[in-house]
Amino acid sequence: MAMPNPSKIACYLAIDVGGQGCRCALFDAKGYKYHELQAHYPTYYPSPDRVEHHAGEILSAIEALLSAIKNHIEQENISINSCGLACQGATLLCWDKHTLEPLSPVLSWQDTRGKAIAEQASLNNDEWLHITGLHPSAHYGASKFSWCLKHISAVIEANEKHRLQMGPLANYLTQKLTSSQHAYCNPAHLARTQLWDHEKQFWNKKLLDRFSIPIEALPRPSPNRFDYGIIKGIDAPIILVNRDQSAALFSEGKPHKECAYINMGTGIFIQRPVASYSKRHTFGLQQSPCYSDSDGSLQAFEASIHSGLAVKKQLEDAIKQPLTSSLIEEALAEASSANKDRSWQLVTASGLGSPYWLENISSNLSSGTSIAATINSWLNSALYLVRQNLELIDNLLGPARQLIVSGGLSQYDQLCQRLADLSMRPVVRYKDTHATLRGTAYLTADQPESWQANKSNTFMPQSENSLEENYYQWLNGLFNYIPQQQTELIAVSHRGDINSAPENTINAIQLAIQSGIKHIEFDIQIDADGIPVLLHDPNLNRTHGINTTIFSSNSASISKLDNLWSLLDSLSSHNDLHLYIEIKHDSIDHWGIDRVLQAIAPLTTKSIRYTLLARSQTFLATARNLGHVSIGANVRRYDSAEQLNLLKLNPEYLVINHERIPENTKLWPGLWSWMVYEVENAAQARKLQQQGASYMISFNAQQLLCNEALHA
């Protein structure tokens, strides 16, 4: 693009404050970048769980860039219309609301010093997700704020004197740069405090009380686009503040919902934009606000992977020299060490992020390997986690047609090609990989239609995918590396309360619910009219005394044969149930996959939480592609070939007859949960629980639910 030459060039200043330094750049309304500067500041590691910056050093770096920008615009006859600021979401500090002096270090998003406090909050994962959209994590603000209130004397004193202000780094910098009377916080940063109720759009009292956070010390809510004040020195207003990853979505204009955006910097973040917040179960993923103004808002499903450049220090300790771009290039060029190395290694910082959310997991780097092998172990483990999270997002939203990559690691051609090969879809990298900076400028300019996308490179997947086998081996190694904690025992009613009513009937299911059961498994066959009916056997003789098959019958004419839609209507007032709907193989074999899926298609529009169970893995994979987001596979063989097939399918649940489980065997670890049938008593349930099963499918579910010994 030719450089424009008007008499006075109107530009927008974008400022990106990251984990290793800050950048600023001037863009016009077409997306042309006139000038870019960067500055670095140190990161401090006082202890393994503490990662800090100094607020004064960050501020000095920004002010130096602003001074240089001021000189540049005076020389080049450029005017700054307005400014935008992007910062990491979970990097935060405490300061004096009157003097604006920092009272704490800047606690990086990598910092987990509040882990013990977070664990004592006594909220389960579903409660966290329901209130905040995020999984519980010491990386976020709540436990860090609470830690500061307990351990930093200046913070304690300021709180007692009602002078305390706490919030994300973006709030502090905005207030400091503009001398604003108040600290304001946008939705993307509010979410990362993990104190914000995304539905009520206000601070959640329950969470504030749990963490003993004074509401008067928190910033005032504001949209992303807002009058934050005038930056001293350059006399230009800040009108846009956003989280760095949220801003990155907008680098080339409005984001596309059918694309996955991967920003590979200090951390690795995957995002898929959606129009509104979803109440679907997210299976280890998160939902975050991306942008809001007076016209509306945008959300995103998101995965956070802790294997980006945040592991740089670990790698430098392992290879005993600085990790340079040339070393990374040389390692990537050694395809043999990338694709043929069978040793299992994990490289991560501050625990394991999506979809596991385990903060006690550390890297597993083998000693004695070459520099290239060590670097490739890091890059491959990062890419494997990217693929796993992409599959989870695809399961919820449908396959992304292409991946758009940005950030420091995306500059390496061979890494982009490796990602294309592993994901089996095109990878697009734009010329300017600083997506946060460009996205901030685009939003600051109010999303102009004149904005032009960068030139891009597209990396197409190769037909021979040599990383595929390694990926599944690595994934199996990860599951075995993660400590297996004893799972919660959940009683699942098998076909309803069959001791009080006929099996697979509305009455039996209602009676099970009345006894306190929240998890119900039942069977579905498809009748001659394509109606899904509650029935186990294809022949009606055992349950209804009619010696004929359901495939030649009209269910409406058969007494006491309930259909699926009548059942769901009867359960419409229950919002805390989970239904496990087994589509019997007889119907799939008789009618075929397409016709059965057509018969149950309205399920995807229902609000009740459900999981499809089936023997056919092809049926389950097709069902997932059609919007059935939770699936469970019946395990017919307990062998390595079946395990590999299930790793590829990646179901949410595995269902097995207890007789098929080898004696004294730990069940295959994975992202799935194990369901076992038929569980007859508490002793059997306890044994299966110790083997790794969570869900006990039983005709005596009410007795299991009431057995206090099982829940001690």
Image: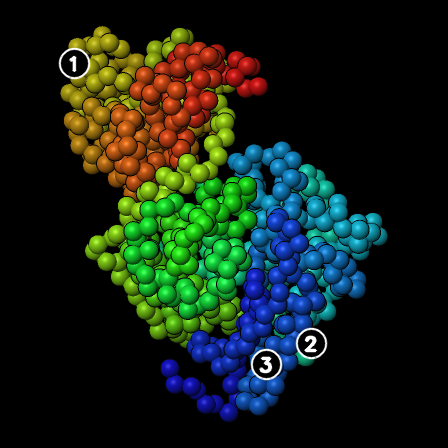
Given contact means CB atoms under 8 Å apart, are the residues at marks 3 and 1 in contact? no
Q: Which residue is mark 1?
A: 548
Q: Please tell me the numbered disc located at residue 31.
A: none
Spatial distance from mark 3 to mark 1, Cα to Cα? Answer: 83 Å
Q: Residues within 10 Å of mark 3 (few under 14, many from 20)?
A: many
Q: Amino acid at mark 2?
A: Lys
Q: Which residue is mark 2?
A: 232
Q: Is residue 332 left or right of residue 366?
A: left
Closer to the chain start, of discs 2 and 3, is: 3
Whether 121 is drawn above or below 614: the answer is below
Q: Could you say which is closer to the camera, residue 421 or residue 400?
A: 421
Q: Amino acid at mark 3?
A: Ile
For label 1, the SS is: loop
Spatial distance from mark 2 to mark 3, Cα to Cα? Answer: 13 Å
Q: Is residue 696 left or right of residue 460?
A: right
The image quadrant where one finds the N terminus is bottom left
- The answer to whether residue 452 of the structure is visible from this angle is yes
**Residue 158: where, in percent of width, then height?**
81, 53
Tag nearer the camera, 3 or 1: 3
